[in-house]
């Protein structure tokens, strides 16, 4: 995932959070719908300072936030001392070596408090005494049963009691691992459509799509159209018939791919 949101992503998020359509935003701000749409999708689109100010005022965020100089919408002038961070932590957060956006999303996750709480209990040994007492009780009961009934250590019931004793490190390792895994899975689901996140449409799957279309196309010219259409990101089936005919004529006259297909077909017939 990205370290920071682009201005396009921020503008789209702000609008969607308010359940606004582009038309409604245009009416509210006086900016045109087409301009607002391009601000959210076109990374090469220049946004005027007037539009930046208008949108910042409407969304009640700072211009610095929209322009990427700050990631804070509300806490624009917070004192670092209010965060109770030590110097080393501040240095790490400012270094750019961490994905601070990911860190923020983890902290905001509804179960982050559980991860932090379980970790704090383990580090401070807050459950050590209770676990030790529980283990001592189980061990005492196991010993009493063995002595009273002359039961050996190999008996299933005794082995079950021994297995029920808790290893503190193992217990909290599983508990904390489950906490962080649940958070990571939720964040993965949220970001599965991000451009930077791997998705099911890999280069391999794209290549397989081309091969499948290539095999289904009949004739050298259609196969050549499939290849070129993919390479040029052209929607061949939706082309205007006149444009398609002109494109076909060019392929027949100049395409080496098409000529190789024709030559190969001729050889196969011999």
Image: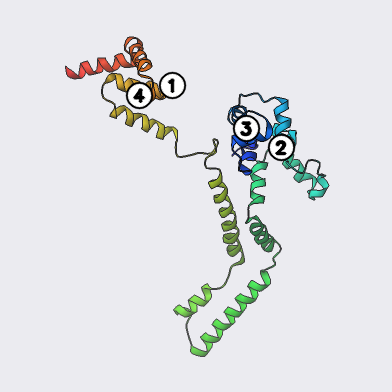
Badge 4 is on which residue? 226
Question: Which residue of the protein is positioned furthest toward the top in this rendering?
Answer: 253
Residue 134 in sight: yes
How many other residues sit within 10 Å of disc 4, few (<14), some (14-19) or many (≥20)? Answer: many
Q: Is residue 142 above or below residue 6?
A: below
Badge 2 is on which residue? 58
Which one is in front in this view, the residue at disc 2 or the one at disc 4? 2
Quarter of the image for residue 182 reads: bottom right
User: Residue at horizontal 66%, vertical 62%?
Assistant: 122
Q: Is residue 206 above or below residue 223?
A: below
Q: Secondary structure at mark 2?
A: helix
Query: In the rendered view, does 206 fall on the left or right side of 75?
Result: left
Observer-nearest of 218 and 35 = 35
Q: Secondary structure at mark 1?
A: loop
Q: Position of residue 216 (x, y in %)?
A: 28, 29
Q: Is residue 123 above or below residue 158?
A: above
Q: Position of residue 133 (x, y in %)?
A: 65, 76
Q: Secondary structure at mark 3?
A: helix
In space, the residues marked 1 and 4 are separated at their CA atoms by 10 Å
Which one is in front in this view, the residue at disc 3 or the one at disc 2? 2
In space, the residues marked 2 and 1 are separated at their CA atoms by 40 Å
Label disc, if present, on residue 8 of the rendered structure: 3
User: Residue at horizontal 62%, vertical 78%?
Assistant: 136
Badge 1 is on which residue? 232
Marks 1,4: beta carbons within 8 A = no
């Amino acid at each position: 995932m990205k370290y920071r949101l682009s201005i396009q992503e921020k503008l789209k998020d702000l609008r969607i959070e308010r359940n606004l359509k582009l038309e409604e935003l245009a009416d509210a701000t006086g900016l045109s719908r087409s301009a607002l749409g391009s601000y959210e999708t076109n990374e090469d689109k220049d946004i005027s300072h007037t539009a930046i100010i208008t949108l910042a005022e409407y969304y009640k965020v700072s211009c610095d936030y929209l322009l990427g100089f700050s990631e804070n919408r509300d806490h624009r002038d917070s004192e670092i001392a209010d965060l109770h961070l030590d110097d080393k932590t501040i240095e790490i957060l400012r270094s750019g070596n961490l994905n601070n956006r990911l860190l923020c999303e983890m902290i905001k996750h509804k179960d982050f408090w559980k991860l932090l709480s379980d970790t704090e209990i383990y580090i401070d040994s807050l459950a050590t005494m209770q676990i030790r007492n529980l283990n001592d009780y189980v061990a005492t009961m196991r010993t009493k049963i063995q002595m009273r009934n002359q039961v050996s250590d190999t008996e299933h019931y005794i082995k079950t009691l021994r297995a029920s004793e808790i290893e503190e490190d193992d217990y909290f390792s599983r508990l904390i691992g489950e906490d962080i895994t649940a958070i990571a899975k939720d964040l993965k689901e949220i970001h599965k459509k991000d451009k930077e996140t791997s998705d099911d449409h890999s280069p391999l799957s794209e290549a397989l799509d081309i091969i499948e279309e290539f095999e289904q196309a009949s004739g050298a010219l259609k196969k050549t159209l499939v290849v070129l259409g993919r390479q040029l990101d052209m929607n061949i089936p939706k082309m205007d018939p006149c444009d398609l005919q002109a494109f076909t004529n060019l392929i027949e006259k100049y395409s080496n791919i098409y000529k190789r297909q024709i030559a190969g077909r001729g050889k196969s017939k011999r």
